[in-house]
Image (cartoon, rainbow, N blue to C red):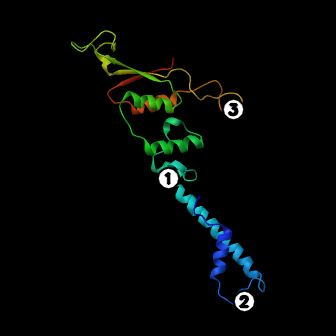
Amino acid sequence: MAGVRTAKEYKEQLRALLPLGPAWDPELVPEVDLVLEGVSQEFARIEARAAAALNEMDAAGVSELVPEWEAVMSLPDACLGATPSFEDRRLAVQQRLVAVGSQTVSYFISLAAGQGYPNATVTEFRAPRWGRSRFGSAHFGTWNAQFLWTLHTGGRQRLGRRFGISYWGERFGVNPGSALECVIRRAAPAHTVVHIDYN
């Protein structure tokens, strides 16, 4: 942290503020240096904590105040489950602060990528309309299909529980998609129906 003074700098500053005279001479009264040493260490600790608190005001560097940020942002996200990891909680705070919603295909692909599906694609269905329908340009269905779309996850999640890199208590061999489904369905336009294809 730039600009934070050390205990040595505080001690030099406090020594410079002492009045003149033999009562404050470190050679005649060594106890003064002991007092200055203790006070300067406490001042340096307080300033370091204040600088750390200032860094916590920005969600990009938050670590200690994650619960306070969560209270302001209606987190932890119910889609992440009952017990998300601390890193997931911190990432959720950072993402919630800068998130901009959308109803575009690229937005839903980015949501899927954020849940660990980097190869996700979207298929939109259209109802056949006279003058606008062309062979090979879209996927057609019935009139009801105009409000349907499919998110293809593109295979297995990029991150999974594997032997040797997971911690105790994590399940092996599964990549639950409940968080993905919750996030996608929550963000989907209200008049649409989304189908998620896990391949």
Label 3 crowd (10 A; few <14 / some 14-19 / many >=20): few
Mark 2 in CB contact with mark 3 (< 8 angstroms)? no
Amino acid type, residue under disc 2 in the picture? Ala
Amino acid type, residue under disc 3 in the picture? Ile
Q: Where is residue 124 in the image (x, y as percent from the top left)?
A: 36, 20
Find the distance from the CA under tag 2 to the CA under tag 3.
63 Å
Find the distance from the CA under tag 2 to the CA under tag 1.
47 Å
Q: Where is residue 55 in the image (x, y as percent from the top left)?
A: 54, 56
Label 2 crowd (10 A; few <14 / some 14-19 / many >=20): few
Does residue 183 lie above or below 136 as drawn? Answer: below
Most distant residue in the top direction: 135
Q: Where is residue 186 in the image (x, y as percent from the top left)?
A: 41, 33
Does residue 93 lie above or below 183 as drawn? Answer: below
Q: Nearer the viewer, mark 2 or mark 3?
A: 2
Tell me the number on the disc at residue 165: 3
Which residue occupies the foreground of this view, 125 or 76?
125
What residue is at 51 percent from the left and 48 percent from the top?
A: 60
- The reply to whether residue 83 is in sight is no
Q: Which of marks 2 and 1 is in front?
A: 2
Q: Decide which of tag 3 and tag 1 comes sooner along the chain.
A: 1
Does residue 116 lie above or below 11 as drawn? Answer: above
| Left or right: 83 as drawn, with respect to 189 | right
What residue is shown with label 1?
58
What residue is shown with label 2?
23
Amino acid type, residue under disc 1 in the picture? Asp
Tag count in the figure? 3
Label 1 crowd (10 A; few <14 / some 14-19 / many >=20): few
What residue is at 68 percent from the left and 70 percent from the top?
A: 8
Give the quarter of the image for residue 45. Answer: bottom right
